[in-house]
Image (cartoon, rainbow, N blue to C red):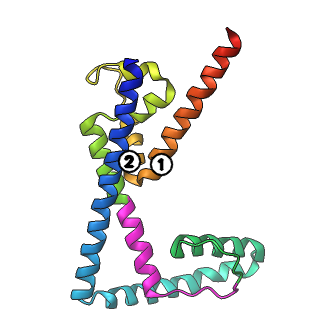
Amino acid sequence: MEILLGTAVLFVTAVLLALVIERILDLLKSLYDLLDSRYDWCRYWTKLTVKIAGLLENKLKLFEMADPRWIQRLLKMAQEFLLDRKDDHTGGTPTLSADLVRAAAIKLGLKVIGIGVGIALAVCFQIDLIAVWRSAAEVGTEKGSAGVSYFNLVLSGCALGLGTGPVHKIVTGMERRAKKRKQAQGVLS
């Protein structure tokens, strides 16, 4: 019972920290948007987009001999990343705009910041989701013992920094694993 309570507290703490990280990133994005509009940083994004477009034109010459289906899949992946939508649009002409470059850069930057904050919080609070994933018996170990792996803490921090989605997937995976273990024990006994 004590192990189950420790696991539940660990998962609730992890989800709450992931929510806190998401809200911090929302605040940072809002602050950046404010500064962007106030200091007219759109010129920087326009210059960067022109530079990227030039580089892509030179690099896309490599695609002249490539299979069109492969290029279509590549363009579809880029569209899903930049526009956050999955549709069956098969337009042949990709468009690059300063707003899309800005959105992709901010999205990537916030992910990196979130992972950094998540790792810091996981190390600070000794949140080791990987040990819980492996077996519930490891949760009862002392927090300061030699059993704490910094690699596990870094992976747990990455999950925290990516948001509540990955943390929720870990929790549901643990529940499925425990259910399978109970079913296997019920069959064996």
**Residue bounds of the magenta highlight:** 91-111
Instruction: Say whether marks 1 and 2 touch (CB < 8 Å).
Output: no
Q: Quadrant for residue 114, please give it.
A: bottom left
* Magenta segment main secondary structure: helix
Q: CA distance from mark 1 to mark 2?
A: 7 Å
Q: Which label belongs to residue 166?
A: 1
| Depicted 166 relative to depicted 48: above or below | above
Of 8 and 96, nearer the camera is: 8
Which quadrant does the N terminus fall into?
A: top left
Q: Position of residue 49 (x, y in %)?
A: 44, 86
Q: Position of residue 129 (x, y in %)?
A: 42, 35
Horizontal relation, residue 95 to residue 106: left or right: right
Q: Position of residue 4 (x, y in %)?
A: 42, 24
Label 2 belongs to which residue?
160
Q: Is residue 92 magenta?
A: yes
Q: Amino acid at mark 1?
A: Pro
Q: Amino acid at mark 2?
A: Leu
Mark 1 or mark 2: name the one nearer the start of the chain. 2
Quick one: label 2, few (<14), some, or many (20+) residues within 10 Å? Answer: many
Is disc 1 placed on a helix, strand or loop?
A: helix
